[in-house]
Image (spheres, helix red, strand yellow):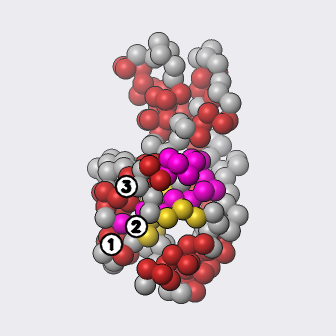
Amino acid sequence: MNRVLAQHGFDAYPLSAYRNFVGDGAEVLVRRALRPGQATEAEIPAYIQEFKKAYAGCWDACTRPYPGIPELLDMLAGRGIPAAVLSNKPHEFTVRCVEAFLHRWRFGGVLGEQAGRPRKPDPAGALEAARLLHVEPEEVCYLGDTNTDMLTARAAGMLPVGVLWGFRPAAELLESGARHLIKRPQDLIEILEYAS
């Protein structure tokens, strides 16, 4: 997004600012990054396309699983616990990320933002993931690092688990309905064992 802003002669943001810009899809990211008066409503779609084009050229530059995620996925697979991925990232890039960085594990569903499926916090994607996993929503432990994730889990009738290695602080996750907070990926196993 900073590249797009620079192309228009606008000031860039520090990386830390994007912690509050991301999480609700490309359109919302662009709207949050544009300062008042920098674009009209009619110009927003063009900025979104510019962002997507810029992102397509560098989507994997600094992307990698958080520490402990491969081990957690190994533990889930070893216990026969199905998993799915739900993101507000455009669907194409969600699939590419999973294929590039999480290809060792099988997911019952990989869902990103696409036409016909509302973005989180609408529960439609989470409920679709539950159907793909062949489980009831109340059987799903929904991990996320933003208020949007916690609201999605609650709206879908799932167990909201806030992760503290992501983008947002514990207070935001709790205020949005997190029932549990975990500091390390492997902490999820204790919650799953308690819930079963």
- Residue 112, placed above or below residue 99: above
Q: Secondary structure at mark 3?
A: helix
- With 188 as the anchor, is 43 left or right in this view? left
Whether the residues at callouts 2 and 1 have beta carbons within 8 Å, the answer is: yes
Q: What is the crowding at mark 1: few (fewer than 14 residues within 10 Å), some, or many (at least 20)?
A: some
Residue at x 35% of width, y 58% of height = 154
Q: Which residue is mark 1?
A: 138
Kind of residue indicated by mark 2: Leu
The front one of 136 and 157 is: 157
Considering the numbered disc 1 on the image, is that residue within a helix, a strand or a loop?
Answer: helix
In the rendered structure, which amino acid carries the disc numbered 3? Thr
Range drawn in magenta: 158-173
Residue picked out by circle 3: 152
Measure how far apart labels 3 and 1 are at the Cα level.
Answer: 13 Å
Going from N to C along the chain, the mark reached first, 2 or 1, is: 1
Q: Looking at the rendering, which quadrant does residue 184 occupy?
A: bottom right
**Element type where label 2 sits in the image:** strand
For the point 30% across and 75% down, the residue is 136
The residue labelled by disc 2 is 159
